[in-house]
């Protein structure tokens, strides 16, 4: 019999990147319902890169429209970084056009949600991507 630690006991972490403090807080509040998920906030793409350089994240959720380094450029940078090539990325944005969705997914995003968001939808998607069951 092998001793395997169940995934539920492993700490997972997510980086929430959005230049709107209320939107960041709303996403963090929704995701705080997921037991065992540590949440870190970044105020834009540059702040995200700083935080990504200093820690390991299991998931990145990012807006597209941000100053200095937007979400699409962040996705492109992460996919070019061997440490983050396979880390799931969820785009949460006001950009609802099919071309925007296609561009984000072609750059390497795993999922695309348009604002206004439904907290339950975001929680379900994060649980699905991170393979975390309901408790």
Image (cartoon, grey):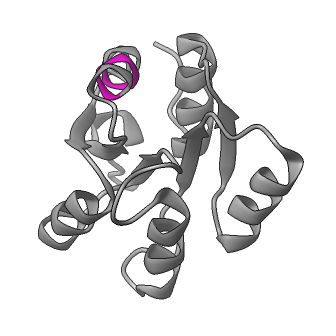
Range of magenta residues = 24-28
Whether 119 is drawn above or below 95: the answer is: above
Residue 103 relative to residue 61: left or right = right
Q: Which SS does the magenta portion mostly show?
A: helix
Residue 44 in the magenta stretch? The answer is no
Q: Residue at x 36, y 33 (%)?
A: 8
Residue 49 location, x and y as percent?
26, 68
Q: Residue at x 37, y 17 (%)?
A: 26
Q: Residue at x 56, y 47 (%)?
A: 90
Residue 13 location, x and y as percent?
29, 45
Residue 73 relative to residue 128: left or right = left
Residue 27 in the magenta stretch? The answer is yes
* Residue nearer the viewer, 87 or 25: 25
Residue 86 location, x and y as percent?
53, 71
Whether 81 is drawn above or below 48: the answer is: below
Q: How many numbered circles does the render carry?
A: 0
* Residue nearer the viewer, 113 or 68: 68
Whether 52 is drawn above or below 40: the answer is: below
Residue 116 location, x and y as percent?
61, 18
Residue 115 relative to residue 5: left or right = right
* Residue nearer the viewer, 127 or 85: 85
């Amino acid at each position: 019999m092998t001793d395997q630690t169940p995934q539920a006991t492993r700490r997972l972490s997510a980086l929430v990147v959005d230049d709107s403090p209320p939107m960041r807080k709303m996403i963090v509040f929704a995701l705080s319902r997921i037991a065992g998920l540590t949440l870190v906030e970044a105020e834009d793409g540059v702040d995200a890169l700083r935080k990504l350089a200093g820690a390991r994240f299991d998931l990145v959720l990012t807006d597209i429209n941000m100053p200095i380094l937007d979400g699409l450029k962040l996705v492109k940078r992460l996919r070019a970084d061997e440490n983050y090539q396979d880390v799931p990325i969820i785009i949460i944005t006001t950009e609802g056009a099919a071309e925007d969705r296609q561009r984000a997914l072609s750059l390497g995003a795993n999922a695309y949600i348009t604002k206004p968001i439904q907290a339950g939808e975001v929680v379900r998607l994060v649980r699905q991507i991170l393979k975390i069951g309901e408790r």
